[in-house]
Image (spheres, rainbow, N blue to C red):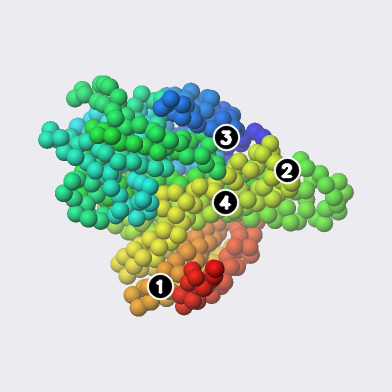
Amino acid sequence: MSYRPSIKDISFCLQQVIGIDEFYQSEGFPDLDSDIVNAVLEAAGDLARDVLAPINVIGDHQGARLENGQVIIAEGFGEALKVYAEGGWNGLTAEPEHGGQGLPKTLEQACFELFHSANMAFTLNPTLTLGAIEALSAYGNARQKTIYLPKLVSGAWCGTMNLTEPQSGSDLSTLTTIAQPTGEGLYRLTGQKIFITWGDHEACDNIVHLVLARLPDAPAGTRGISLFLCPKYLIDENGHIGERNTVRAVGLEHKMGIHASPTCVMAYEDALAEMVGPPNEGLAAMFVMMNAARLAVGTQGVGIADRAWQQAQTYAHERRQGKSALTGASNTPIYDHPDVRLTLAISKAKIEAARAICLLTAQAFDRARKGPESDRTRAKRREDFLVPIAKAWSTQVGCDVASAGVQVHGGMGFIEESGAAQHYRDARIAPIYEGTNGIQAADLVGRKLSQDNGLAAQELIQDISHLIEHNESKYVFHIKAALEIFKTATKWIIENKTSDGASVATAANRYLMLSGDLIGGWLLAKAAVAAKELIDQGHDDTSWLNTKIALNDIYASQILSAASSHMTAILMTAAPLLSLSYEAVFPE
């Protein structure tokens, strides 16, 4: 099917729900206005529709392969990267001094939703480069910023993130890659990294690997991790490319989805590198990149969900079967059957909620860095609290909607030729990488919620309460009960974290899902209120605006109604789990 960029929905979310216009001509973004936002979104939509979407299926079928030590990428992907780079898309949020445009991350993530929707496997490449730009901007020295940032921002070079090792997954304290000082301010890296997205290819002039490794005398655990910059091709003092470094891909993973994205096993064999940031403080620098990646992965979830929903929506309109209980017509499009339409409506509501959550998180990122000084601390708390929710809740939406899309297709959904299966296969990785969704939930209750004794959650409660108090009850009444349950759950988590850590950890995922459900409901209610105001003002797109109100109603009855069951699950202690030992539940 043809891909249709969801610019109208994204623009409505940016303008009416998130309020991107607060950045217009502000101190942080003095040149930003609605014309720029609209122009950037339109250009992103053109790139997504005309360049990225047409090669999505090709990439799925061809995949990437390793031949004679060289990673070969799918047809059209190298050319697409050149078009992407020429458009300056890596530089949306980068500082002008490094060739960037200095625009808000809120707008960047709106554009990247379109890119992920059109071609998730492709967009993983620039997503990693954006993370490298942020890490070097925060921790790179003057030379690194001068030489590497302009190349990464321009898209001439690509970036990667190298964390995982065969024996060291999410627990980075066990990584063993060694960085041996050369005595000349440089280091030789030796070790192996796995699951490295776009770890090698020839689609750009150079690849900048950001690698976690240990100095020979480093302390044990995460306190002894340093961050290193290791280019595929060595660079001289003037930034000119020289000979090939001794880092190479020695294998490609054979994956369930995102086939066109080469996921590499990387071998570092005395590869020359330089340190980024202070010694033994690499984890802090890498977390800048990981934090950016986690929000980006949440946006991936939104993008792939929207693509799967579009395809299912179109198929349901075209496929005719049976008599409709809605219209009474025979040989009706299956879209007119209540179950199918409800399935698609729930999917659409989840997409709009997840989109708003991710853009709200990006807005907090912008406020924390370029907002008024008095607002930055609060914005940083909001960002920290939202990131694990944006990542985990939105990627679960990606899987749910893609699965629903297969279901709407019926038997055809299980056939690869329909295309619905690819979206599900691609979506399934997002809840896993950049910290599994279980890890995001543990981070939310273990660190983010407890900071300042739950102040970020209390501020969120205040904002949601403000909407309830200042708007007609028919648009916001459903939030009240969910908000009270969220208050109770938050209080329970904070009070029991120390005395019953096992039970709190057991409740973490349900608490995160409750949080995402509530925040999504709050933002959809804001959308409904804004839509009603536009209708009252005589806006001529009444039919489309009424869908925002209908989706709010559907979300309330189908999603927020589960808040009480979340609470029941949260209050379950860890005691039942303790009786389920491996031997007891799986006897010989």
456 w.r.t. 572: above or below: above
Q: Residues under labels 1 and 3: Cα distance?
A: 42 Å
Point out residue 463 in the picture as x, y percentages from the top left corner: 43, 63
Q: Determine the residue positioned at 36% across, 46% down.
A: 165
Q: Determine the residue positioned at 82% across, 56% down.
A: 325
Q: Residues under labels 4 and 2: Cα distance?
A: 18 Å
Q: Earlier in the sequence, mark 4 or mark 2?
A: 4
Q: Which residue is mark 1?
A: 502
Point out residue 257 in the picture as x, y percentages from the top left corner: 55, 41
Q: Residues under labels 2 and 3: Cα distance?
A: 18 Å
The amino acid beneath tag 2 is Met
Q: Are marks 4 and 1 in contact (CB under 8 Å)?
A: no
Q: Residues under labels 2 and 1: Cα distance?
A: 44 Å
Q: Determine the residue positioned at 26% across, 26% down.
A: 234
Q: Earlier in the sequence, mark 2 or mark 1?
A: 2
Q: Are marks 1 and 3 in contact (CB under 8 Å)?
A: no
The secondary structure type at the circle numbered 2 is helix
The amino acid beneath tag 1 is Ala
194 w.r.t. 344: above or below: above
Q: Which residue is mark 3?
A: 60
The secondary structure type at the circle numbered 4 is helix
**Which one is in front, 330 or 152?**
152
The amino acid beneath tag 4 is Cys
Q: Earlier in the sequence, mark 3 or mark 4?
A: 3
Q: Quadrant of the N terminus?
A: top right
Point out residue 279 in the picture as x, y percentages from the top left corner: 18, 46
Mark 4: few/some/many CA within 10 Å (<14, 14-19, 20+): many
